[in-house]
Amino acid sequence: MAPRTPRRVCDVDFSRKAHEQQPPLHNRWHPDIPHIAEVQENEIFTVEMMDCAGGAIRNDDSVADIEALDLSGGHCLSGPVRVVDESGALAMPGDILMVEICDLGPISGQEWGFTAILPGFGFLSDRFPNATKAIWDFEGIFASSRHIPGVRFPGMVHPGLIGTAPSKELLEAWNAREKALVDTSSSPLVAALPTKRNVLLGTIEEGSPDWERIASEAARTVPGRENGGNLDIKNLSRGCKVYFPVFVEGANLSMGDMHFSQGDGEIAFCGGIEMNGFLTLRCEILRGGMKDYMSPTNLHAQPFFEIGPVEPRFSDWLVFEGISVDEHGRQHYLDTTLSFKRAVLNAIEYLSKFGYTREQIYLLLSSCPCESRISSIVDFPNAVATIAIPTAIFDQDIKPKKKR
Amino acid sequence: MAPRTPRRVCDVDFSRKAHEQQPPLHNRWHPDIPHIAEVQENEIFTVEMMDCAGGAIRNDDSVADIEALDLSGGHCLSGPVRVVDESGALAMPGDILMVEICDLGPISGQEWGFTAILPGFGFLSDRFPNATKAIWDFEGIFASSRHIPGVRFPGMVHPGLIGTAPSKELLEAWNAREKALVDTSSSPLVAALPTKRNVLLGTIEEGSPDWERIASEAARTVPGRENGGNLDIKNLSRGCKVYFPVFVEGANLSMGDMHFSQGDGEIAFCGGIEMNGFLTLRCEILRGGMKDYMSPTNLHAQPFFEIGPVEPRFSDWLVFEGISVDEHGRQHYLDTTLSFKRAVLNAIEYLSKFGYTREQIYLLLSSCPCESRISSIVDFPNAVATIAIPTAIFDQDIKPKKKR
Amino acid sequence: MAPRTPRRVCDVDFSRKAHEQQPPLHNRWHPDIPHIAEVQENEIFTVEMMDCAGGAIRNDDSVADIEALDLSGGHCLSGPVRVVDESGALAMPGDILMVEICDLGPISGQEWGFTAILPGFGFLSDRFPNATKAIWDFEGIFASSRHIPGVRFPGMVHPGLIGTAPSKELLEAWNAREKALVDTSSSPLVAALPTKRNVLLGTIEEGSPDWERIASEAARTVPGRENGGNLDIKNLSRGCKVYFPVFVEGANLSMGDMHFSQGDGEIAFCGGIEMNGFLTLRCEILRGGMKDYMSPTNLHAQPFFEIGPVEPRFSDWLVFEGISVDEHGRQHYLDTTLSFKRAVLNAIEYLSKFGYTREQIYLLLSSCPCESRISSIVDFPNAVATIAIPTAIFDQDIKPKKKR
Amino acid sequence: MAPRTPRRVCDVDFSRKAHEQQPPLHNRWHPDIPHIAEVQENEIFTVEMMDCAGGAIRNDDSVADIEALDLSGGHCLSGPVRVVDESGALAMPGDILMVEICDLGPISGQEWGFTAILPGFGFLSDRFPNATKAIWDFEGIFASSRHIPGVRFPGMVHPGLIGTAPSKELLEAWNAREKALVDTSSSPLVAALPTKRNVLLGTIEEGSPDWERIASEAARTVPGRENGGNLDIKNLSRGCKVYFPVFVEGANLSMGDMHFSQGDGEIAFCGGIEMNGFLTLRCEILRGGMKDYMSPTNLHAQPFFEIGPVEPRFSDWLVFEGISVDEHGRQHYLDTTLSFKRAVLNAIEYLSKFGYTREQIYLLLSSCPCESRISSIVDFPNAVATIAIPTAIFDQDIKPKKKR
């Protein structure tokens, strides 16, 4: 019999730029971006994916590429892939699409990735204003970096971005609510609204009426939303089963932004270990699943998932805490974001005693498999957040010691 | 030779009320609350501790006790215990006190606990306005509840509250910043300011000038702060090593609020499995450790810890996600608290399909060993928070299924 | 309501000798040893248990007690406990008795244990002919030894011995087959046959006709058999569910030989960390379970079990291998015992480079939570056995290193 | 900079037979088989490997190929690969060669494997006399079989066979001891002695004087030995570091017999999930390491290893026990092999209640990630062995239950 070799439904030519790919990539969410492939329930298939920056970042020691990065494009996505059941009938709105991550990893010849601080972006952008880049080398399951010496760890590889296409109704809701946020904010950078600049719409012909309409409506890829998207959940790794709501016929699954590893929070913005890669999937359709498992309406839904069985195993963790008091000593009320910021700063303070610069630690906490927890959220006025660092990633003992 | 039987340095008589205990308990933080015991580095010692409500909650099916609960007292703490090194010299400000949790658990005859929703308090107080109570029975390492049938799980027992005494300077900073928060808030419930009501100050004679002064200054026990305190971190369990900053001579360690189990977040307020219990500890003093491992000043510090080796082991998790869009569809900017709220609501929605009331699920997510993560905090405008539920705690299969 | 406080059905007075206990202990297997307590399905109950040597070993640095040890008694067992269902009907032959280990641990005031080499006994008795003893101190979940410095580890506490009473028929089969082995062996030490010497038969009056009969028939406690007994399986720890065949009315469960920790194999004979302790249990009766789950006959059966959820968690292991070639270079055929012996010797050779004597390592591998595996059993002529040692138990890094 | 793409030092053409490969494979151990590639310390390199049967087994439902299998060839090995340090100096006898398994897995287009019972071979050959075959399909990290429905599990992929070349002296010792075993046994099948039949010697020209000499001396690949070889240790998976003794200049590492998964013991002989695959490695040389870490002589040595960080994670195990009493009720003395046999038979008996044939279970226990332990080896006359089965591999609940 024939082996269950995954069918490759989306190839990427990594010697070409994002907009030169065939089949063409897309970097927006819109119900009218046509699917480029069809797969059947339980079929094993593979897609290749470009890194989050579409190949703009180089394996070198210069930050010129980081400084030149234009975010108006967004993640270059592979797909959409539409899904049919074993009788050939399409997945339908109201269904749930179960996507099992059978395998994933780097492309041969592309065994490297990067983590970067983009000026003005990221969780601690006030503290880290300068463009910074760390290159990671992959040695099978392990990553290490010439820019952050003395650490090496197994990757928990995952697609930072994966999701189903939104319906027209859902897209309109996104655009309305994000515009409202921008309209009421002093900074324009609170949300990325639709723009035709650097847009890629798959097989839609550039400049056509459809292209003009879709380009002006299509949602940007920056945030995760009801359809999944750029959730950047580090545990979406090998063996996971992700349950997506289906909003359009065929489900139209898109994916990209692969990470070799990421810490919970992805604090440095380009904060995972960003890489080119492949993703091997298997789908099932749960007919009418949204009603059964998610929500009484077809609009308010959110993916959920089962964690896979092969996550790296650490047993020693050093855990740092933060509370809702800011760096000026001002008390805030149950502000989890602030508490987490303080936890991260405490971790940076601690690790800086071990020979690392603060930039290196910031990049490391963003990319290594640390766990960021909401530990307590009711003990007013202090929410407690924690960040747990696996000590085994260091080649030195970072636990505190009595002086001799 | 003599066995290393822990020395019991603080007894509780569980047939008596909190204010009747001998040695007397305390329910405030203040540098002048006298230590009731002294232990030496590396000595193994035990304290007994009352539950968070000081014995006010009964093992019955009525919520009358919950409705009558007066929070002005706060957690009844055992200690303070002061620590000396092997030469008899006190722990000193600027040192770190390492506290190893050697063992902990229920008191014989007290093998039960409670989880409660207090009207007006808790993470989802708008959704769950009514007093609710679940009683848990302990069967060795396992807990089950007649009020939430069909679940049973091993406890990750921990002291919700443990910390060193604040210095005068630190206490003043707490009081100033919390008062400032209250002064600028519309609700008085944003922080619990000092009050003489229901105060317990250990061996300080009630009504004495010292008592009057300390009672009016002493910090409430509700939140966690720089000294540790009510951090409610569920992983502070068997085998942990916690590193506390030392702010006063002797360190003066206090503890209470034991939980048989708690979910990350402790969402229902009295949300762990609240219990009476004992705590067996071993301390070490890291001379000058605050400077080495925490902070350049003796004020800005936060405990950190190493996780112990015997946490319950789960391999199957169902994980729910939330984003920074509120229930009215309004977009917020990287609001982790809101994202987490939506994740919890999604989990409640899902589990309500399996025969539970929403109150039962709220109590369960608050008390079972679920993990609450900050998954992504940079993808504006949506922070992504997740709550992971170990499926093995249910006696039914709660994973989604295709219809047959 | 009343808490589920375990009912203590068997007390031990640890200031008295084994034969002075009330209720009296027993150190033989026989269907006619009367039960001393009755418990109901799902009741939580506790038994206290003497260590394997019945209190003969002292917490000191002398081996005089080891050299004087008389093995003719055997393990002093608590029980038998008979079990009834919720209607009061006895467990019956052919049923399965599920025994859940709800909790277990040291007795207050008895926080120590011992590991010993008995001359002439143990897996490597040819290499280690001298009586040797290591005393362990318990600090909550951790054990350390003044006789093996530099190691400390969490215990995986378990009853080395637990089992149901044999039927008359089963007992006769044991006696016949063990006698046949002795009769055909050159050494009398291949099996311990019935003897009246140092026998304890619970409430049977010494010297009575029943006593004379039972004493001459009753099986010794040394080996594990179809009823469970001295299986010395280190993973029978907290949260396990053990399924025992029932051979007599009431099942008559006996238990003893508690270990704070043990390595797979228990190679040094008194090789676990032998201790006094308590055991808290819950039983269920599976009517007719032997036929459903074990064997078509009521005689050929063997307990099986589910592992509990709170075993200590290690992630770094150093693993040593052995093959079926003896120390003289002679090839044997798929001899797993020999392969394991060579694996253990290789581990001893390796660890002896790190400052330990071979006796210390032998005692350590016998008592720490190492895993002993049959890795390959078909690749003639070499079976491959391995012993895996958790590196975290050492306070030094024992992994191999390049010279600098 | 260039990525650390593994250099492929040994290609296999899977459309050709074993003896047609270029570079040529070998199926014997001998110091004079020339290396086919050289790698440097810390270089990342890949080898492709044929399955254990050299491509003779087909992905179909017939056992004709199993019945026709000729074992005189043995495993077809890739390599030898010789290793130099960063200065270009060869690894030398007395050194240790550390081999890190950076990654490994199936070859694209070859995503299947087989498990087989060979008549006359295997641990339970008396019970399972007939040729039997199960084909496994790989879906990324998961395997399932149309011949054993209802099970699916993640693989713990490993090379069943990997080792360094023996020295002339060591080879002579092997041949002498194995011949002595054959000479003193009634069955010739106790060891596979050198034979020219079906021999492959890499680049040695067939029929040349060297070929004649080497073919008549070279050791068969069936067993594991001091150089590693066919150890069939299932945990030699991703991220492991294996420490091999070096017996010849360059170390000359060979490898083959890849398994997608295997149970401890590999009981069915072709008992892992046999597959074609690739293996990505990194080496380090520990100069003089044999003396430091293994043995005072260069002959008595055995590899050891560190377990990697990404093994599949199971938390529920059902464990079956066996003792040293054979199926006729005869008592043996501390016979671990027999005890393990009884444990396996008990597991087969149990699982046969759940709709599987005994052949299916035998194949399953041989290939799924079960753990086989030597639990007790001193409690004469019964050694206790156990086999632990992860319950999560089944799509039905296989735990025992009370009848309703």
Image (spheres, coloured by chain):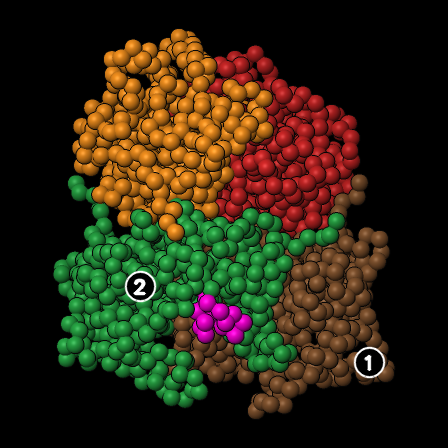
Chain colours: A orange, B red, C brown, D green
Residue visible at 75% across and 28% down? B63
Q: Looking at the image, is mark 2 or mark 1 nearer the viewer? A: 2
Q: Is residue B38 visible?
A: yes
x and y percentages locating residue A139 in the rendered image? 28, 48
x and y percentages locating residue D69 in the rendered image? 37, 69
Compared to residue B380, the image places residue A104 above or below, namely below
x and y percentages locating residue C17 in the rendered image? 73, 73
Q: Is residue C254 visible?
A: no
Q: Is residue A88 magenta?
A: no
**Label 2 chain ID:** D
Q: What numbered label is drawn on residue B46?
A: none
**Label 1 chain ID:** C
The total number of labels drawn is 2
Compared to residue A211, the image places residue D310 above or below, namely below
Compared to residue C400, the image places residue A362 above or below, namely above
Residue receiving disc 1: C211
Residue receiving disc 2: D54
Comparing C5 with A63, the one in front is A63
The image quadrant of residue A108 is top left
Q: Tell me if B236 is positioned left or right of C225 in this view.
A: left
Q: Tell me if B86 is positioned left or right of C169 in this view.
A: left
Q: Amino acid at mark 2?
A: Gly
Query: What residue span does the magenta drawing correspond to?
Result: D116-131
* SS type, badge 2: loop
x and y percentages locating residue C167 in the rendered image? 76, 73
Residue visible at 66% across and 64% down? C294
